[in-house]
């Protein structure tokens, strides 16, 4: 990027190379952003699936708790007779 003289002292900047360098860096970062966006979408899908699974498990736990409570009350009635 820097042009040097015969004594290797910088005397000018090669501005024509700056645009190419910046474009290359921009493209690298753009690829990273696209990759992160893709990963984020996948994580959002996984999170939604996990939330659905947790809701289903909570419903199952509630159902089993109700069945257990009903079983315990029946056992209590049988032992009182």
Image: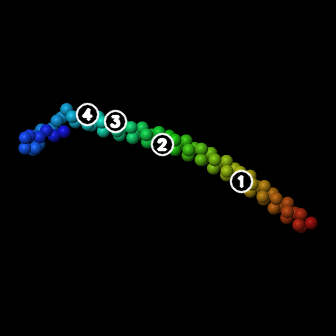
Q: Earlier in the sequence, mark 4 or mark 3?
A: 4
Identify the disc placed on residue 27.
Answer: 3
Quarter of the image that includes the N terminus: top left
Q: Earlier in the sequence, mark 1 or mark 3?
A: 3
Residue drawn at point x = 30 percent, y = 36 percent? 24
Residue receiving disc 4: 20
| SS at badge 2 | helix
Q: Residues within 10 Å of mark 4 (few under 14, many from 20)?
A: few
| SS at badge 3 | helix
Q: Position of residue 61 (x, y in %)?
A: 70, 54
**Is there a contact, CB below 8 Å, between mark 4 and mark 3?**
no
Q: Earlier in the sequence, mark 2 or mark 3?
A: 3
User: Based on the displayed image, in which of its 4 quarters is residue 17 positioned?
Assistant: top left
Identify the disc placed on residue 40.
Answer: 2
Residue receiving disc 1: 62
Measured Cα–Cα span from mark 1 to mark 4: 63 Å
Residue drawn at point x = 37 percent, y = 37 percent? 30
């Amino acid at each position: 990027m820097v042009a040097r003289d015969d004594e290797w002292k910088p005397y000018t900047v090669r501005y024509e190379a700056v645009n190419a360098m910046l474009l290359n860096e921009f493209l690298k970062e753009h690829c990273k952003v696209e990759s992160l966006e893709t990963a984020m979408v996948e994580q959002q899908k996984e999170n939604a699936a996990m939330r659905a699974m947790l809701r289903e498990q909570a419903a199952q736990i509630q159902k089993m708790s109700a069945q257990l409570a009903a079983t315990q009350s029946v056992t209590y009635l049988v032992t009182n007779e």
